[in-house]
Amino acid sequence: MASGELDRAAKVRFAREAVIAQVRGLPNQLRARLTDGPRTPVLLPDPPDTALTRDVLELARSSYQEPLLGHCIRTWFWGQLLGSRDGIKPDEELLYLVCLLHDIGLTDNHRPPESAACFAVHGAEVARTTLAGLGSPYADEVAEAIALHMNVNVPQGPEAHLLHAGAHLDVAGTRAGDLPRHAIREVVAKHPRDGFPTCFATLMRREAAERPNSRAALLWHLGMRLPLNHNPVDR
């Protein structure tokens, strides 16, 4: 699946993994809806501020629609918070870059050509080229994490792991029950989710139509819209 295109057998495996993950995540989703989560006090982290992160943030601001930019920034917060909970210590600059660029393939400025099989794989190459041009040593690591973030199973490596966790939490509420409600409220107050479910649904519907053998298409047809519109983060 180097190109991101799924054959019939891969679709069956991917669909099975997605259904199993959804069922396993139900208790956590219920906890997020019915309780205020862990009572542990949490301080929100500050984003890393370097010349490289400033350049990439400027690129993100000029490329993303506002709801999608907010998603990328919240993904970083969720990833950091889940990493602290799980004892995972990422490279903070690398994780921030990964989160900012992970949906760059959904933007009008960097949309995949018709021949591309997957927006995430295409976006990974955009990120690789962009970071290499900026002289970043992280180009390959960022590209690999972005290409993997649409997988159901959590990828290896701290940054890829936390990108996956943060993005899936922001889209579908996965593991929202592992975070204190006060921390969720603080993140959403800083970076509101206004318009995000509608924006993301529109983009996924487009991906499903244009790249029917992609992971995004299969997740859309498996019912992504339901958790997207009923995310416990919005409680």
Image (spheres, rainbow, N blue to C red):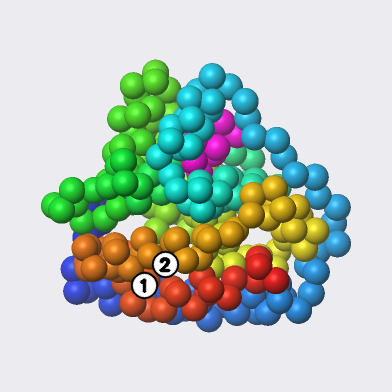
Is residue 51 visible in this depiction of the protein?
Answer: yes
- CA neighbours of label 2 inside 10 A, class few (<14), some (14 to 19), many (20+): some
Front position in the image: 28 or 192? 192
Q: Amino acid at mark 2?
A: Ala
Question: Magenta segment, which residues?
Answer: 91-100
Q: Which residue is located at x 70 percent, y 35 percent?
A: 46
SS for dot 2: helix
Q: Which residue is located at x 80 percent, y 69 percent?
A: 36
Furthest-left residue in this view = 115
Task: Specify whether residue 124 is painted magenta.
Answer: no
Q: Dot 1 corresponds to which residue? A: 220
180 lies left or right of 191: right
Q: Are marks 2 and 1 in contact (CB under 8 Å)?
A: no
Residue 152 coordinates in the image, percent (x, y): 43, 65
Q: Amino acid at mark 1?
A: Trp
Does residue 137 sit above or below 8 in this rendering? above
Q: Quadrant of residue 45?
A: top right
Q: Nearer the viewer, mark 2 or mark 1?
A: 2
Q: Dot 2 corresponds to which residue? A: 201
